[in-house]
Image (cartoon, helix red, strand yellow):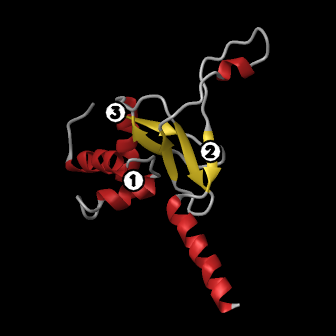
Amino acid sequence: MERATRQRAAIIEAIVMAGRPLLPEEILDAARNLVPGMALATVYRNLKLLAEDGQIRAVQLPGENTRYEPADQAHHHHFQCRVCARVFDVQACPGGLAALAPRGFTVEHHELTLYGTCGDCGRGSTRRRSLRRTKA
């Protein structure tokens, strides 16, 4: 990898501190706290280098833009909130998924994404429902 830079260090810190996969725009917002004036092009350039170097990995969800997380995490899955679209790590795996493959097939890898409402958005909808009830 090329030399370490303040921008690259800020990008890595943003990804690690988030504790969840981040979009490049989310990485930029967090990294700007450490390096004001950073540009989105700088984030994309460094994400490419960090991924090539094996420090981060891309998280691809169907129909979504690529998110990034630290590469040193153990096998895990993801949860996407349908309200805010944030993605969170799920530190569990149901296992036994190879049994779902047709006879004679070999499962080499799997990804599992759960969809629903995150805690923040769920609390907001509960609050909205209770407000509606008190107004009625």
Q: Which residue is mark 2?
A: 114
Q: Quadrant of residue 4?
A: top left
Residue shown at 25% from the left, 34% from the top: 2
Q: Is residue 99 above or below residue 47?
A: above
Between the residue at mark 3 and the residue at mark 1, the CA separation in whole angstroms equals 19 Å
What residue is rendered at 44% in x and 52% in y? 24
Which residue, given by chain and number where applicable, does mark 1 sit on?
Answer: 41
What whole-number distance in Å separates the C-alpha atoms at marks 1 and 2?
Answer: 31 Å
* Nearer-the-camera pick, 24 or 105: 105
Residue 2 against residue 84 in the figure, above or below: above
Task: Answer with mark 2 or mark 3, whichever residue precedes in sequence.
Answer: 3
Q: Where does the image place residue 68, in percent across and percent down from the top left?
A: 44, 43
Which kind of residue does numbered mark 1 sit on? Ala
Q: Which kind of residue does numbered mark 2 sit on?
A: Leu
42 vs 104, left or right, is left
* Mark 2 or 3: the one toward you: 2
Tag 1 secondary structure: helix
| Residue at the spot 34% in from the left edge and 29% down from the top edge | 53
The numbered mark at residue 55 is 3
Residue 64 x %, y %: 61, 49
Q: Give the residue at x 57% y 64%.
A: 122
